Amino acid sequence: MKQGFFHKLLEHKTAANLFLLLMIILGFYASKVLNTQFFPNYSIDYITVNVEWPGASPKDIEYSIIKPIEEKVRYIDKVKNTKSTAKEGIANILLEFRSGADMQKALIDVDRSIKAISNLPDESKKPESKVIIPYEQIGLILLSGDVPETQLKVIARDIKQMLLDKGLDKVEIDGLRKQVIYIDVDPVAMFSNKLDINDINTEIFTNLKSIPSGVFRDDKLVQLRTSGTKDTISKIKKIILSSPYTKQDMIVQDLAKVYESTKETESYGLSNSNPALTLRVYRSLGTDTLKATKALEEIILDYNVNINKDIKIEIYDLSSQLIRDRINLLLKNGVGGLILVLIILFLFLRFKVAIWVALGIPAALSVTLAIMLATGQSINMISLFALIMMLGIIVDDSIVVAEHIDYQYEMTNDPYKASFLGATKMLGPVTAASLTTVAGFAPVFLISGVIGQVIEAIPLVVISVILASLFECFFVLPGHLNHALSNNKASIERKVLNLNSYLTYFNKNYFYLLLKKSIEFRYTTFSLAISFLIFSIFLLKNGVVKFYFFPSPESNIILVNYNFFPGSLKNKTIEFTNELESSLKNIDEENIVKNIYSTIGKPIWGSRDSTKEEGDHIGGMIIELEPSENRNIRTSELIEEWKKSIEPKEGLRSLIIKERKGGPPGLDVDIRLISKNTSLNKMKEASEFIKENLFLYEGVSDIKDNLPVGKREISFIVTEKGKSLGFDNRYVSKKIKESFDGVLISNFFRGEEEVELIIRTDPKSISISNINSFLIKSPTGGLVPLGEIVNISKQQDFSVIKRRNGFREISITAEINENILNPDYFFKKFENEVLYKIKDDYNIKWKLAGRSEEQADTFGDMKRGAFLALGVIFVILAFIFQSYLLPLCIMSIIPFILIGVILGHWITGFDITILSLVAILGLAGIVVNDSIILVSNIYEKINSGKKVLDSVIQGSQERLRAVLLTSFTTIGGLTPLLFEKSLQAQFLKPMAITIVFGLLAATFLVLILIPALIFIGSELKQIIFGSKSWEEVEQRKQ
Amino acid sequence: MNTFTKYKYYFYPLLVFVILLLILLILKVFQTEVISLVEDEKKILVQTKTVYPEEIRPQFLFFGRVAGKNEINIVSRLSGKVIYVSKKLFNSDEVKKGEVLLKIDPFEFEQELISKKALLDELKIELDKTNLILTEVGKQLKLAEQDYKRKKKLFGNTVSQKALDDAALKVSKAKTQFSQEEYKINTIKVNLRQAEASLNVAKKNLSFTKYRAPFEGKVTNNVIDVGSEIKSGELLGKLINTAELEAKFFVGESIFTELVSSEELKGKKIKIRWNKSKFNKVYEAQITRIDSVISEELAGLNMYARINNISDDDPIRPGVFLEVLFDGNVIKGAIKVPENAVYEEKYVYFLNNNNAVRTKINVEGYIDNQLIISGDFLLGSHIILTRLDNFQNANKYYSKNN
């Protein structure tokens, strides 16, 4: 069957060419259709439940809303985790589902569970639950200028509409404050007329109809047709109010100031001390980043032509720029690698053979793209990385098949027979080699979480490449070689450079001697290999070679988050923002700062350590620098210099400046305190204790926890006297809210802009000294001093409370500078010296999360996966070679690849990263291939009855070329990346180092150690089962 | 040598491991300590205030309004047509005492005066006439009595009984006539007094046609104009004494009891702040009276204070809304701090060797939006004014001021 198929294929005149053509067409189509994006799509299914309870404190929200809901939804089918956040007035419960959950059903389940809860507070609004649709940010648009904020708002809305019209999926405007018409009532005037806010509100509300050009529905202003706000304001000012005191009419203006402003409680943006907005542009997972970016760039370019020069519109933080850079980088290195691979092929293979092997590369790559398309993958950082990694491997199958065809041709001088024999004889080993490579990468599939989802693109690409490569080497290559060799009978021996003869010379002399010595001193060989292995592991364990879990390429984005002590005024935040901006400009001698956007009143987005707490005392900043290639100063250096130049500011609680890190993992240090019943104060104390100790370590920075203390609140309890006057808590809190927070009379639209009409007591007239005298209208209509009816107390509470899986949880986060402090050492010491006290002294459970948790999880998954992979590789080999010992022999090389990997990182000064680990998995597959080529040949010879020593030496010598070729092509493919200077590549280099150095060492060991090991093995076998000793062998040899 | 050759296959591996061990040992020995601790903890810059305890009066703030000291209603005594209204009424200008504010048509009242005067004159003439008659009658009575006396003496002699009886009858007649005249005069006199009174009323009514300001002040709410008919008893407006203004303000029961227990409130000097958009002025005032009853509904009472030093061109008017600043009793050894510097209403932080030291204090009251606190303060110590949170053990504090 098999033979029949290959015969037909070889006899067919056009099949090979047609297959090749088909492959290339498919690849071309796929390259046009494949989505380009930054990271592979990874999505965790989430349902979020929001419940509003205006005015409620985080503690009340936690107790009365989150707890009951959590209890109901936590055990819904497939819910993996619940994360809840209680903030003032709002509860948020985030349900993380296991992959594969039916989210529509899940949503129905969640809704049903929530509906079953009967004890939610009456004042709370209806819980709203929805499935989170994942979006990816593709870029930001900065709008700034010395112009009124309203003008920026109009432009922002305009651009947003244009972007949406162009098919971009989601646009958010950051820093947009609502327009509000404030009616600030003078309390003295109000009280003297025996009125309160609610009275005036009612009168104004009923009189709103006097506003011309308004559209009313149910007596409520819904739309203002003209843009005449001034007109509206003057009409409101003239609204007549009747005073129950003087029985005389007066107008709103007599009592209140009416003016339009932006909403005071909302956060907003600044850039270079000017008002600014940022549009955040997103794509949905199905949209191509590069195409979306192109549309974005076109719109902004067009818009900029017609815009006032005072207004600056700039695109920044464009993720597609990184993709373009990375694609270019990888393509450049890929082409370099390809050339090296070709040179190696041409040096060692017959010209015609080399040509057809080389042609296999684009063909296999094409099919890889097609398979990627068919399996729903995309072009992204990770898949491109995998493609580059596979560049040397892609030809391995072809080399093995072609080399064997060549060998058979030399033996038989019959191209047809040679092609046939080459293909059929190699079908087993090559398939085995391919399967073991797949098995080597397969553990990556077992890595769970976001990291797993992101890097599973690697085995997907590897499988695609291997499938493509297998197809090419068996379906296309034999046909072409048959044809090529038939036409070239005259020049059988002609090669471009006859390196083969040098190789043969080397093989017969130096390699033979080396092999002989290594077998003679096999225990020394073995102990040397073991020593090198121990030495390498020692280097890693002792931190000489460092391990850095998930490095990020240098970022052009700096994120800043700071907060003052709560209660600090907005002016201070603005002042500090300006100081930060100017200090940055002062140190920016090279002019590398491209854009700055600051938020006042909230932290900057995208920062992993932000609590998302809001308030006047909080601010953030995003800074875009020139691309790292275009500047001499590194982002981290700039940050250090900047930090030094910032003058300390009074009342600054924390300032965190850091480079934005890409990739999925959490923060370097993330210590979680978990408790069910411990009071928040005690948990905070424990958190402070940890923070205090973290501060002591050099190299630990940006220390923060996520249980922030909020603003002080004034709380009221109605006194007995108050009750006797007819007041109750609910009534008083309503009245107080009306008086101090104001009442929304109406909100209406002016064009597209929503305008709120808010009446409140003039904030300037309320102070701590008159709060007791502040008058509240009693249910009977009299004005009673607040101090007479309530006990006023001021309290400061936590502004955000976080829960996870039903427990209160505080996360204490920090960053570690790995150049100063080794994280593994640090954690060990910190656990022994500090963290154990948390359990003893505070009776609170703790665990390590963030990078260390993810690292541990990933390692755990990888370990399990690695064992599984080894088992699978063993099974594959045992099946194909029909032996139990042979696979063990083949696989014995695997542990020794660590020597090359660790020493390679040591020599080049790079850290070992997760990419190195992934590459080690791949490397194991590649090395096993080399080993298979060698060991299978030796065993073939032993099985054919040859002496062990002869078999080992002969077998090794015969396979030298094949082993060297497959290794050198793989090394060649990655060598350019090893010498790449660009900063982007620094992130990928550990992978190249792992494969290049690992393979160099492993190739050497395969050729030297494996023969020695086989001999040791056979010797042991003989010692155990037979009588032959080394002396006997020695004698026979002589 | 032979032994070595024999065992070389075992010796070399051992040598390899020994060398390895040596290398590892050397590396381990020369390995640098990877963890170092930092000396400087997290620094936080704070604003401080040096403590100098002093005597401070807390300040209470109430809401109130201005009222005139006396306010009267302008009520018409007469009915009639208004023929004149002072322009000052329309402009709300100040009017002088005795100044005519409005006039009612006086014709009717002039006529009445004339007729009343005529009546009086008539009565006076009649009185004179009756007086003359009375004199004559008196004379005749005297003559009759003399005649009777003479005849009585001569009775029995020259005078007969009849003549005596005649003389007695004459006397009796004369007496009766005299009494009649006397009565007549009294009646006229009464009429005369009545007529005089009527005349006075008419005179007064005439004068009432001109309404004069009884005191210096301002008229509010005037509803009349020239030509309008008014009725007697109709409210025409209000005249407010602007020379003396009073602040009327509401004080909660608890504060009132606190204040009243410590000092005499009547006569106490307070401050009044009138703060209206661009106008901001503080006036001196003195408490003049206090409501005698605490309102059950409002949990407080009104107090009144006379506002001093109001100049003529001062725009303050009765009816304006104002804030009343009331100084409390002196607190000794107190300091003023912003409200932000006080925690849970009973603690402050002192800066001591770069540590924030929590210290208990008492909040005594407020002044100028600051808190007055007392406690065991060390003279010259530094109180932290920057708001901290209650969890800051990891920090080192540095004063911005020093």
Image (cartoon, rainbow, N blue to C red):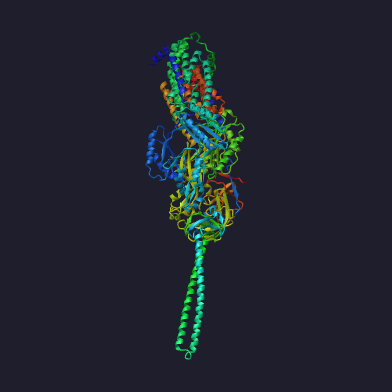
Taking the image as drawn, is residue B30 in sight? no
Quarter-of-image position of residue A432: top left
Asked whether A656 or B78 is in front, the reply is B78
Q: Position of residue B223 (x, y in %)?
A: 49, 54
Instruction: From this view, report whether residue B17 is shown above or below residue B327.
Output: above
In the current view of this chain or complex, which residue is farthest to the top? A490
Compared with A211, A445 (above or below) is above
Q: Nearer the viewer, residue B308 or A61?
A: B308
How far across and down, in percent of the image, does residue A160 sit? 49, 32
Q: Position of residue A72 (x, y in %)?
A: 39, 41
Where's the N terminus of chain A, which quadrant? top left
Give the total number of marks visible in the rendering.
0
B75 or B211, nearer to the observer: B211
- Residue A908, image x and y in percent? 56, 27
Is residue A509 visible to the viewer in this orientation of the structure? yes
Examine the rendered structure and indicate whether residue A334 appears above or below residue A719: above
Name the one closer to the observer, A999 or A65: A65
